[in-house]
Image: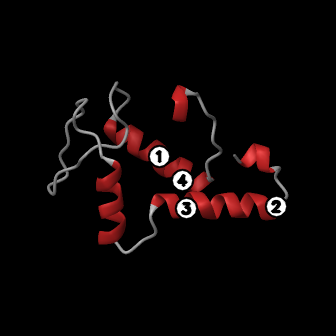
């Protein structure tokens, strides 16, 4: 996390299942979790094969979906609506 802090984040069950499926495909090796995958579906787990923030943003644009930061804001709003303390949200 920011400032090299360890953070725990609750995941929606569908998100958790998708992430577990990806980790099973990718395998549990050191290196970045989210990596570049070629058009033919092959990939290589190397330290320099990670997806950049800009690459993720471009994928969101390509597939006409919301940007990750918008999801963060929406989730924070949802937590606030549910009565979660602002200090916990931050």
In the rendered image of this protein, does residue 27 appear above or below residue 54? Answer: above
- For label 3, count other residues whose C-alpha is less than 10 Å away and answer few (under 14), some (14-19) or many (20+): few
Residue placed under numbered mark 2 in the picture: 82
Task: Report how far apart the C-alphas of labels 3 and 4 lie in the structure.
Answer: 13 Å
Task: Report how far apart the C-alphas of labels 2 and 1 lie in the structure.
Answer: 25 Å
Q: Nearer the viewer, mark 4 or mark 2?
A: 2
Q: Are marks 1 and 4 in contact (CB under 8 Å)?
A: yes
Does residue 1 appear in this view? no
Disc on res. 19 = 1
Task: Give percent across and percent down for residue 12.
Answer: 62, 53
Residue placed under numbered mark 4 in the picture: 15
The quadrant holding residue 64 is: bottom left
Query: SS at mark 2?
Result: loop
Residue placed under numbered mark 3 in the picture: 71
Task: Give percent across and percent down for residue 16.
Answer: 55, 47
Q: Are marks 3 and 4 in contact (CB under 8 Å)?
A: no
**Mark closer to the chain start, 2 or 1:** 1
The quadrant holding residue 6 is: top right
């Amino acid at each position: 996390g920011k400032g090299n802090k360890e953070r725990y984040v609750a995941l929606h069950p569908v998100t958790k299942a998708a992430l577990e499926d990806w980790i099973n495909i990718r395998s549990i090796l050191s290196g970045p979790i989210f990596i570049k995958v070629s058009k033919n579906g092959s990939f290589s787990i190397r330290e320099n094969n990670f997806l950049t923030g800009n690459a993720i943003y471009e994928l969101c644009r390509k597939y006409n979906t919301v940007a990750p930061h918008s999801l963060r804001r929406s989730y924070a709003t949802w937590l606030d609506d549910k009565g979660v303390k602002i200090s916990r949200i931050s």
